[in-house]
Amino acid sequence: ADFDEIYEEEEDEERALEEQLLKYSPDPVVVRGSGHVTVFGLSNKFESEFPSSLTGKVAPEEFKASINRVNSCLKKNLPVNTRRSIEKLLEWENNRLYHKLCLHWRLSKRKCETNNMMEYVILIEFLPKTPIFRPD
């Protein structure tokens, strides 16, 4: 029973540390769709212009290559599978490159700026850096 209590305390400390690190993370970068919005609110193309807030975090070429992979995924999939396909692609991109750069890409639903409809955007979140004194 004592062992479980110690484990829970360590877990609480770890969660508190993560929350503290998240407070100091910059706001996520939003990549909006630039094509026509489909029935499901998913754009048929995402803007490949490099956001200035990612300067020094990721190479513009890598960013553009990732967006191009998302756009080609949008072109070849039927609307039923598209969202899931893009989520899988973004998961692969995160594991391949972006988690190492303390970035996390995900598909997020947001309200359109021009009307009351919802649209999907790519949200690029800044992950907190793990402290050096903590093991992997």
Image: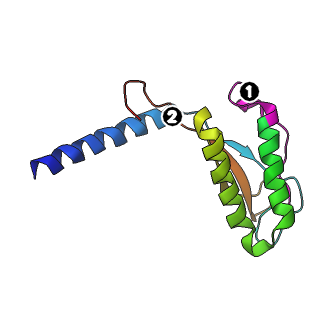
User: Where residue 44 appears, x then y in whole percent?
Assistant: 85, 61
Quadrant of the snapshot with the C terminus: top left
Circles 1 and 2: CB atoms closer than 8 Å:
no
Asked if 4 appears above or below 57 in the picture, the reply is below
Above or below for 36 versus 53: below
Residue position marked by numbered label 1 in the rendering: 55
Residue at image location 76% in from the left, 65% down from the top: 117
Q: Residues within 10 Å of mark 2 (few under 14, many from 20)?
A: some
- For the magenta stretch, what is the residue range? 44-61
Viewer can see residue 110: no
Q: Position of residue 72 (x, y in %)?
A: 85, 57
Q: Residue 85 location in percent, x, y? A: 71, 63
Q: Is residue 125 magenta?
A: no
The residue sitting at 80% across, 60% down in the picture is 73
**Does the magenta stretch mainly form a helix, a strand or a loop?**
loop
What's under tag 1, amino acid-wise? Answer: Thr
Q: Single out the residue that lies furthest toward the bottom.
A: 80
The amino acid type found where label 2 is placed reads Pro
**Secondary structure beneath label 1:** loop
**Which residue corresponds to the image point at 10% horizontal and 53% vertical from the top-left?**
1
Q: Which residue is mark 2?
A: 128
Determine the CA span between mark 1 and mark 2: 17 Å
